Amino acid sequence: MNKELAEVIKLYATVSNKDLNNYLLEKSKNTLIALLTDLITMYINDKNSSTLREFLTVTIAGYEHTEGKIGYNGYKQMVYEKPIMCEAKPKNVRSDGKRKLNGGGNFTDYTHERLKRDLKTNLRMLVSGFVNGKLIYILNFRSIMNSLLKN
């Protein structure tokens, strides 16, 4: 993180919005562009948060994103049917690392209770792949639970 971005983050957390805005208004356009670019780069590649990658996966796939960590990640409202819900599983790898994209997502938070709930919905899985924060693909498919339920 560059020193300018570190200072802006510190000010955001410790001073009023008015003081932060005044500080930012003194910066050049190029400095503000660099700050925003650095912040987005850092956030989209964060190993501990998939919020931006999840948002991009859901919205680019044509769903409305739902905020929050609990529940589905998005939905499509159908005219005469129930909404189509989606669960996003984005994966980000670094080009300088050993991990490769393989079409998988992180399902470690999937519980038996969620499985029971999802069997009753028209759930779609959105598995996406990012390299260095750049979107490479989105796979959109009906979850295995829906297929099992129909058989």
Image (spheres, rainbow, N blue to C red):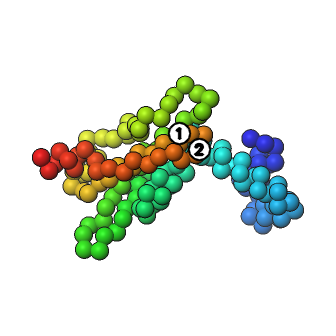
Q: Quadrant of residue 66?
A: bottom left
The residue positioned 22% from the left and 50% from the top of the image is 146
The kind of residue tagged 1 is Asn
- What is the distance, in whole Å, between disc 2 and disc 1 at their CAs? 6 Å
Which structural element holds mark 1? strand
- In the rendered image, the vertical position of residue 27 relative to residue 41, given as above or below: below
Q: Quadrant of residue 103?
A: top left
Which structural element holds mark 2? loop
Q: Left of 93 or right of it: where is 38?
A: right
Q: Position of residue 84 (x, y in %)?
A: 31, 61
Q: Left of 75 or right of it: where is 4?
A: right
Residues at marks 2 and 1 touching, judged by CB atoms closer than 8 Å = yes
Q: Left of 102 or right of it: where is 32?
A: right
Q: Which of the two labelled residues, at mark 2 and mark 1, occupies the earlier sequence position?
A: 1
Q: Quadrant of residue 73?
A: bottom left
The label number, if any, that marks residue 133 in the structure image = 2
In the depicted view, which residue is nearer to us: 103 or 23? 103
Q: Which residue is mark 1?
A: 92
